Amino acid sequence: MVLYVAASRDRSERYWNSLAQSASSRFDFPLWRHYCDELHAQWLHQRLPPSRVHKALKTDLFDEACGEGLAECLLALTLPGGECHGFDVSSVIVERAAMRHPRLRTHCCDVRRLPFAENQFDLVISNSTLDHFHRKHDLLTSLKQLHRVITPGGLLAITLDNSHHPLLALRNGFCGPFMGGGVVLPYFVGHTMGLRELSKELRALGFEVLTCGHLMHAPRLVALHLSRLLPSQGAAARWFLRVLLALESLAMLPTAPITGHFVAVVARKLPDPSAAGN
Ligand SMILES: C[S@@+](CC[C@H](N)C(=O)[O-])C[C@H]1O[C@@H](n2cnc3c(N)ncnc32)[C@H](O)[C@@H]1O
């Protein structure tokens, strides 16, 4: 198993490194990045308790390598003197994120084998990192790793591609659960879960699910392509962002499971009952 993860880590690192080196222009649209950052920051702001944490961790540094990402949001969630960590399997992405955000403590590692001691982090943010594996087993291994490094009582805020979104269902129907880069998104997408399955797996690991719902209700393909055409600043850009973010009100309708591109869960790690009385 250890050998499999090591070999697979090398493959993942090569894949994401070459993508970052050769294809960054295909996903680096400032207006789109701005929308993604704003959307996730708003979600965290609305769903996380207001108290700040000592030690926070973000899985994958893609957003921080391309632009602002969630670096400022993570820093704002951390107490003065606290630590903000982030990691990615791609050394190229880690380097770029570290250059842009020197206050982040960055690491190059695989989420399936984290080099951190257990019970370290009060908060882990994982936005669409774990939905890039060939095997469901790797997604589950990653969830276990996140559970291991979170302190009892600590929080996990996680999003995954929503397997019930019609575009995703269509893609899986035609292309199998995986799609190589290029057709719709510039990168490989893999196994994912619906909200019920993700919540069930999190509970089985020893999390209490605090909130769950769907995120990104703007039509992704249309919005992505429009964001390439519009100027990244000015009145039109501001109006475009306002419209995309306003579409999040669709999360309140019964149709949310088919309009949301991501499932989004905030969960708390329960204390280990076997540790009681130790
Ligand atoms: C396409 S990006 C998407 C994530 C981004 N947060 C978003 O919301 O769009 C996937 C990121 O996960 C990283 N990644 C892929 N497999 C990984 C693994 N096994 N361990 C850690 N990071 C991984 C990639 O290098 C890449 O930066």
Image: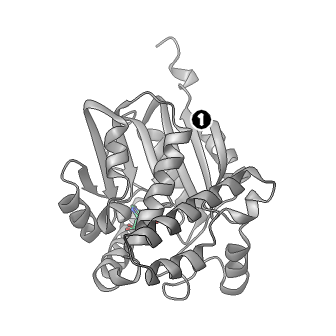
Residue, disc 1? 206
Residue at the (18%, 53%) spot, across then down: 102
Instruction: Please identify the residue farthest to the right as the structure is shown.
Output: 254
Tell me which amino acid carries mark 1: Gly
Q: Considering only vertical position in the picture, is 278 above or below 39?
A: above
From where the camera sits, is residue 1 visible? Answer: no
How many numbered circles does the render carry? 1
Instruction: Please identify the residue farthest to the front as the structure is shown.
Output: 235
Q: Nearer the viewer, residue 270 or 275?
A: 270
Pinpoint residue 19: horizontal percent, then vertical percent. Answer: 35, 80
Q: Nearer the viewer, residue 175 or 250?
A: 250
Residue at the (34%, 39%) spot, across then down: 76
Q: Nearer the viewer, residue 184 or 33?
A: 33
Q: Residues within 10 Å of mark 1 (few under 14, many from 20)?
A: some
Q: Label 1's element?
A: loop
Pinpoint residue 184: horizontal percent, then vertical percent. Answer: 55, 84
Pinpoint residue 114: horizontal percent, then vertical percent. Answer: 36, 50
Pinpoint residue 260: horizontal percent, then vertical percent. Answer: 67, 62
